[in-house]
Amino acid sequence: MRYIAFLFIAFSIATTYSINAQQITNQKEQHKATYEANKLLIQSKTYTISPEVVYIERNRKAINSNTNFLSINGDHFTSNLETLDPKVTLKLDNKVSNYKEDSNDDRQVIIVEFSTSDSQFKIIIQPIGNVFIEITKSGETTTYKGKLK
């Protein structure tokens, strides 16, 4: 009887391990596909990011991803980004300078950096599709989290 119980437990563990391994493999494949698609989009230099959250350090606020955006079109970008201050919106329409992109195929992370006359921008695209925009102006960094479109 103990032998049957032992076999049942061993079979259950093996089945669970096999299912988890398949799920991890499927997730890795999905992330790789997302990463490759995002990489092509970033290389085209024609994309839009729709943020859903803005934060500075521990302060954060949900924002409307339908009205907030940062768009890159070649060497030009536009944005309409709410800030933590309800009276201030970043409506920018500038030329991009020092645009550089770096793709880490091992980690499946893409980093884009560029600047304007008074701000530094860093965009981090993760393999699961999350995008972080870090805008540094006058020593203060505001971060947005959203999706790439």
Image (spheres, helix red, strand yellow):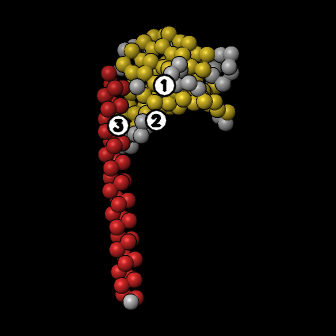
In this view, 122 is above or below 117: below
How far across and how far down the image is residue 146, in percent? Answer: 50, 30
The circle drawn on residue 89 is none
Question: Which of the 4 quarters of the picture holds residue 106?
Answer: top left
Question: Which kind of residue does numbered mark 2 sit on?
Answer: Asn
The answer to whether 16 appears left or right of 88 in the picture is: left
Along the polypeptide, which appears first: circle 1 or circle 3? 3
* Dot 3 crowding, Cα within 10 Å, few <14, some 14–19, many 20+: some
Question: Which kind of residue does numbered mark 3 sit on?
Answer: Thr
Cα distance in 3D space between marks 2 and 1: 10 Å
The answer to whether 49 appears left or right of 3 in the picture is: right
Residue 88 in view in this figure: yes
Cα distance in 3D space between marks 1 and 3: 17 Å
Question: Which of the 4 quarters of the picture holds residue 61?
Answer: top right
Q: Find disc 1 in the rendering and name its residue.
A: 50
Q: Nearer the viewer, residue 34 or 97?
A: 34
Q: Find disc 2 in the rendering and name its residue.
A: 130
Q: Find disc 3 in the rendering and name its residue.
A: 34
Q: How many marks?
A: 3
